[in-house]
Amino acid sequence: MTPRAVLYIIYSMRVGQPVTPYAIRKIILEESYRAHVGHIGSALSIADIIAALFSDLLIIPGPRHPERDRFILSKGHAVLALYAALHLKGVLTRAQLGTYCGNGTLLGSHPEHTLEGIEFSTGSLGHGLAIGAGVALSARMSGGRYRSFVLVSDAECEEGSLWETVMFAAHHKLSNLVAIVDNNGQQAFGKTRDIINLDPLAQKWQAFGWDVREVDGHNVSELKNTLCGFSADSGRPHAVIADTVCGKGVSFMEGKVEWHYLPLSDEQYAVAMKEIEASK
Amino acid sequence: MRRAFVNTLLDIARSDPRVVLMTADLGFMVLEEFQHTHQSRFFNVGVAEANMVGLATGLASCGYIPFLYSIATFASMRGYEQIRNGPILHRLPVRIVGIGGGFEYGHAGPTHAALEDLGITRIQPGLTVIVPADQMQTATAIRKTYDLPGPIYYRIGKNDACVIPALEGRFTLGRIDIVREGSNLLIISTGSITAEAVAAAGELSRDGIEATVAVVSSLRPAPVEDLRNLFSKFDLAVTVEEHYLEGGLGSLVAEVAAERRFHCRVVRCGVEHSLPPEIGSTAYLRELNGLSAESLATRIRETLRSAG
């Protein structure tokens, strides 16, 4: 048995609840409503990607284990989905979750690295992929088998710094690096196609030398199959363009620009929760 | 000084496998020996400083000590936000090496003149800022600090021949080094321009004006106690830096002086005007901005005269 397989067994024995899209979305609604904080649409957009990663794909035997896979949420504003997964994995307690966006908490509306389970503080777009590439490079240099997964937003691809990393990772054949693009076509002021048209996004990553797959970002089994299928020795970094809908799971939020920022009213919360419960 | 830096790092890297050197495509004819000796720990990341800082953050989080090499303007400014949100925020041992502060790139023009790097780095409480005055001090400073926890900004002079007499390679974090003693006034200097400050003190001495010359190579942590001790002994302190007047050594000294009741007046010598458009050699630009030994001596004489 390889050391990697042993780590996996240890990891899978951790206490926790199933990390399902339903459970993540429920927590997103509960906590954003309680804290009266927005960015709900963005968090709902990545709920299925987070479920695919955290159910059993990332191998994290302990939060500081040197051989753990690293997950970097570069689109930090969607962090509530990540807090939900960390709670379901048993890393964050319900009481900790209940401090979301309160005074003195470590659970802000962007990730803070001193919180267990968070690798890096993010929130300034265009930065996370470079850090992730540095982690992947470290694994390569030290002979480690850990992988680096970075979740970026589609509008984050408007940042020039991201493409610096895209070029570097391809040049250095960082096949232990996986970038997942939450391709929901929306940004703060409207549709990406109306603000800075990113199309054809997959071809752009491909042209830069990445191994690119396009998937339904709300289909957990498709996401898992794709993410599990990557070879860390393929000679190319991997990009998953995950087509998603901002606000996915709550009909009145889906594809609506205002849900990038708005918090929920009492009535909206009741309707939204009913829809999420129905999806269980 | 950059050769002293590279040679020291080359040596440290032999015994410390954590040391990595990255460059944003600068250092041609300077970094090759490191590249060939430590091939697996040398990366030319291309012309992409912001990415270089991000990569280094990832590397440092996994136990490496990456040194990032570029010209001081690009090293300190292009990836500034990445430095703040990366190694500073995460308290990681990334070393940002800015080569050739002030006018050391001479005729390369204003885009290559680092006149604010010390100001913008010094204001970050989580960032150590080190500015060696000559090559021997560069070697000592790198050796003594390379494995400190947290990030460091080094401003390293371009001139490999620079030697400050009596400095003899001394460096202590948070302390001042005295390279000349005199009782009429205090000159406080940082970095390569210290050679001009020392020469100015020599000129003044011929007129019977004796200056103490203090070298500040540790801007953060600042040598607060040493400065206070010196202020109590002098009526005039003149700061000399190849930097804008705001934010750098002069500001640091004025801040320390203002917090206690000293009789010591602070006069700052630095670059007063925004991005000077004139092109010329380092010596020409220093002279133009009142930073040559001769113009410093003249300014000090006038200051002493006007003070009665």
Image (spheres, coloured by chain):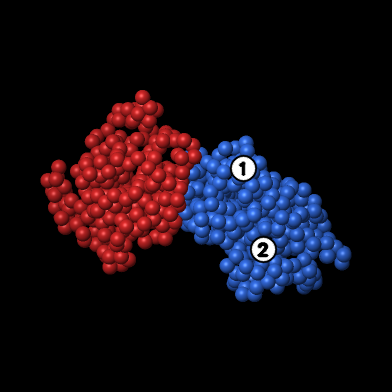
Determine whether B56 is above or below B25 in the image. Answer: above
Q: Which mark is residue A272?
A: none
- Horizontal side of B111 relative to A236 (left or right) equals right
Total marks shown come to: 2
Q: Which one of the lettered chains is coloured red?
A: A
Residue B287: x %, y % from top left? 73, 70
Helix, strand or loop for disc 2 = loop
Q: Which one of the lettered chains is coloured blue?
A: B
Q: Chain of mark 1?
A: B
Q: Which residue is mark 1?
A: B37
Residue at 73 percent of width and 49 percent of height: B136
- Horizontal side of B165 relative to B150 (left or right) equals right
Determine whether B116 is above or below A9 in the image. Answer: below
Residue at 50 percent of width and 43 percent of height: B60
Co-location on one chain, circles 1 and 2: yes
Q: Which mark is residue B104?
A: 2
- Horizontal side of B29 relative to B213 (left or right) equals left
- Within 10 Å of disc 2 (Cα), the crowding (few <14, some 14-19, many 20+) is many
Residue at 37 percent of width and 51 percent of height: A210
Instruction: Quote the CA–CA distance across marks 1 and 2.
Output: 28 Å
